[in-house]
Amino acid sequence: MLLAELPLGTPATVEQVTPASADIDAAVLRRLAELGFLPGEPVRVVQRGPGGREPLAVQVGDTMFALRLLEARCITVSVQGASA
């Protein structure tokens, strides 16, 4: 599941970070990694912007960030406690 699709408050774990479109370059992926979006890190969507869109307030580890949907679509997560 993509982070952009994760329901509010659902605990998940980062699986991988990959470019979601041609608009995403290596600098964006590096920034996401520097923010802590690394495989194995706990993550959850705390809030969505107006109309349920962007930005997304996302907590990774103990820190909260605002992400655009385009960035959140680069992050694949697994829901904690869900079977594969």
Image (spheres, rainbow, N blue to C red):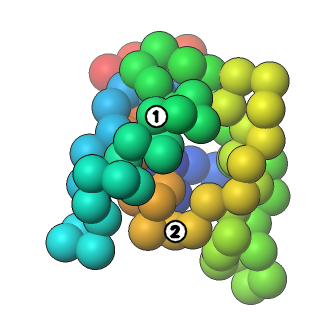
Residue 83 x %, y %:
40, 18
Instruction: Find disc 2 in the rendering and name its residue.
Output: 69
Q: Secondary structure at mark 2?
A: helix
- Name the residue type under label 2: Leu
| SS assignment at label 1 | helix
Q: Residue furthest bottom?
A: 51
Task: Report whether residue 9 is seen.
Answer: no
- Relative to 13, does residue 30 appear above or below in the rendering? below
Q: Is residue 68 visible?
A: yes
- Callout 1: few (<14), some (14-19), or many (20+) C-alpha neighbours within 10 Å? few
Image quadrant where residue 52 sits: bottom right
* Residue 8 horizontal/vertical position (percent): 73, 50
Please state the horizontal and vertical placement of residue 28, each as a whole percent of the image.
40, 55
17 or 50: nearer the viewer = 17
Of labels 1 and 2, earlier in sequence is 1
Pointer 1 residue: 33
Q: Could you tell me residue 75's position as x and y percent?
A: 41, 44
- Where 75 sits versus 16, above or below? below
Gap between marks 1 and 2, in whole Å? 16 Å
Is disc 2 surrounded by few (<14), some (14 to 19) or many (20+) residues within 10 Å? some
Q: Quadrant of the N terminus?
A: top left
